[in-house]
Amino acid sequence: AKTKVRKNSGTTQGFYWVDITEEQAHVLSETDKALVVLRLKSRNILMVKWEVLKSYLTQECKRYNANEYNHWKLNIYTDHIKISGNNREIPAKVWHFNAEV
């Protein structure tokens, strides 16, 4: 299944951020295996297995607004991902994508 990250993703305060909506989480959870790939600036990407990421998306971390409705805010650093409202960090690594596309 292919999901689309909303255009309001960006970078502030030294990290990138993106919202994962409740609907996107539902679609990803219906797959056998899913990989979340986040495209960052300067041809950098970050990949995380959905089964790992979803364990960090707790009800306590869920936010609500009129655009994304129920969602989680992911703060993306070069060596980890932090879900707003969750003290745990997901180890991660940013990769540089060299291929011409």
Image (spheres, rainbow, N blue to C red):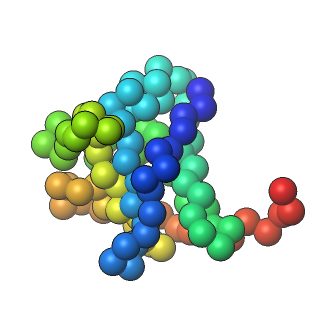
Task: State which quarter of the image contains the C terminus.
Answer: bottom right
Q: Quadrant of residue 32?
A: top right
Q: Quadrant of residue 43?
A: bottom right
| 33 relative position to 70: left or right | right
One can see residue 18 in this view: yes
- Residue 40: x percent and y percent? 57, 64
One can see residue 62 in this view: no
> Nearest the camera: 6 or 35?
6
Query: Furthest residue to the left?
Result: 60
Q: Is residue 24 above or below residue 72?
A: above
| 100 relative position to 7: left or right | right
- Residue 22: x percent and y percent? 33, 31
Query: Furthest residue to the top?
Result: 30
| 63 relative position to 19: left or right | left
Q: Is residue 84 above or below residue 27?
A: below
Task: State which quarter of the image contains the N terminus.
Answer: top right
Name which residue lies at 86% across and 62% down. Answer: 100
> Nearest the camera: 6 or 49?
6
Q: Quadrant of residue 90?
A: bottom left
Total labels: the figure holds 0
Name which residue lies at 17% across and 55% down. Answer: 85
Name which residue lies at 25% across and 37% down. Answer: 66
- Residue 3: x percent and y percent? 54, 34
> Nearest the camera: 74 or 8?
8
